[in-house]
Amino acid sequence: MTKTPMDKGGAPRQQAIDRARTMTTAQGGPVADDQNSLKAGARGPTLLEDHVMRDKIFHFDHERIPERVVHARGYGVHGHFELTEAIPDLSCADIFQRVGEKTLTFTRFSTVAGNKGSFDLARDVRGFATKFYTKEGNWDLVGNNIPVFFIQDAMKFPDLVHSVKQAPDRGFPQAQSAHDNFWDFISLSPEAVHMTLWQMSDRAIPRSFRFMEGFGVHTFRLINAEGRSHYVKFHWKPRQGLQSVVWNEALKINGADPDFHRRDMWDAIDAGDFPQWDLGIQVFDDAFADDFEFDILDPTKIIPEERVPVRRIGTLTLDAHVDNFFAETEQVAFCTQNIVRGIDQTNDPLLQGRNFSYLDTQLKRLGGPNFTQIPINAPKCPVHHFQQDGHMAIRNLKGRANYEPNSWGEDGGPRENPEIGFASHPEEVTGTKQRVRSETFADHYSQARQFWISQTATERRHIAAGYTFELSKCQHERIRLRMLGHLMNVHDDLANAVAKGLGITEMPEPAKPARTPITDLPPSDALSILKN
Ligand code: HEM
């Protein structure tokens, strides 16, 4: 006689294991046959009543969500941040209070311009976005591997991105060699020239994600318990060092292994070789900001590390793969507006626009306002509010009160708490309402020149070769010449090397600067011109 599991005395356990491994529909019903649809006769039509097939195909049909409008190709990794220097004097952010304390993190690296299926080693800026699940809410540091940006005002972001992605008529992806549209836009936007020097440098073809720096780019604020504000720039310094490939290697690697960077990260974590970055801060006050030659709100400028040294206050360790790429890497939603008490915004016009853009795009990308309930986005601290309903509301509040103020006492739900709640820095703001770019943002060449001068001979050769390769793809002479006009304002050596590479013998007129580059002036004039 065949023994049933019950006879073996292990019935509940045995059956539980079988059930646990039994395939079901999304409704939980066990599936008997996952190979064949339900038909009227062996060679007859498939029946509409086949709920098993409908359940399966319906879901498959809806697997895709919109890819990110930028930074579509990314790779996410779990980790933790450990504080090595407490900074209560500068910030009351909970994450910066106790040396040795660890905070869980999720980091997503990305390319900017390429679509989701593009290759890893395009010449491009890399995104470096980290979500810190702090005890007082999520803090997102949404940065890049280059410390400056192409544009100064978010108003120009759609144009920048349109110019670098597929042209609307031909639909070619532009990730590898940007083309007429990109250089047309850039050469008409002198504020972008500094960033293009970084972009043509080896930084834009990193050896792997593990060997890149990261930058918050904008100036933010740190606010201490007394409400005192300091300005801050955030940096990630890789403990592995900084490494890049050269252009010929990048081209070959892209052909041989388009997943080179993500595979490198996967292999390193698999091998227990966990990459680490130190979190650095450059802290300065109003007096420094007033004296600095450039506007600290201008995201096309850096603050040289010789002027304000980077102070390392903690270490990020990336030590775990995602369980599921889509659920975590694809559904993670970073936003510059996700800040915590002790950190605050500034009036950088690019940052202000980003604060609007991320939430707005995620509403569509993730299908409604409840994406903070997706585990990768959910805070790991208690969450209490009166937000409710909307698509996919899976954690609506309990109890009768869904408004405040209310007089239901203990049953009345969460209350405001001015003692630990977020308070914006009470910055005084006055001014005429107008569409304008501050005059203090107008020097577009000085820092580009400083960057060029700071490079070694080999690095300069690579930068010139980068421009030469990219501009050689431009079909239109006027765009090449216009760009050359900007490079003449950066440095003659650079302009001459690129002209030679492009076979241009007659140099154009240099671009007319919006204002005299500061490095052309004696230092005293350089300072006074910005203060006028
Ligand atoms: C995505 C960085 C400027 C709009 C991203 C991501 C990073 C990033 C790292 C990828 C996030 C992820 O991995 O999911 C930056 C930096 C900027 C900048 C450092 C300048 C300093 C802007 C501006 C805008 C913008 C000016 C718009 C006004 C977006 C959008 C996404 C995105 C819409 C896609 C978000 C999503 O679908 O989840 N950015 N960005 N970015 N960025 Fe930016």
Image: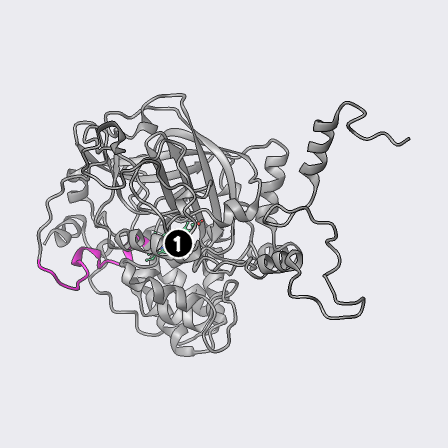
55 part of magenta stretch: no
Q: Quadrant of the C terminus?
A: bottom left
Q: Quadrant of residue 442?
A: bottom left
Q: Position of residue 75 (x, y in %)?
A: 53, 47
Q: Is residue 469 left or right of residue 279?
A: right
411 horizontally vs 28: left or right: left
Q: Which residue is mark 1?
A: 368
87 or 199, nearer to the observer: 87
Asked which quadrant contains residue 180, the reply is: bottom left
Provide residue 458's location: percent of width, then percent of height: 49, 51
Q: Which residue is pictured at 26% across the width and 42% down the height?
A: 220
Residue 515 vs residue 257, the one in the foreground: 257
**Above or below for 10 versus 27:** above
The residue located at (56%, 59%) in the rendering is 117
Q: Residue at horizontal 77%, vertical 22%?
A: 9
Ligand 1 within 8 Å, label 1 CB: no
Disc 1 is placed on an element classified as: loop
Q: Quadrant of residue 37?
A: bottom right
Question: What segment is highlighted magenta in the picture?
Answer: 432-447
Give the residue type that dot 1 points to: Gly
| Residue 322 visible in the current orientation | yes
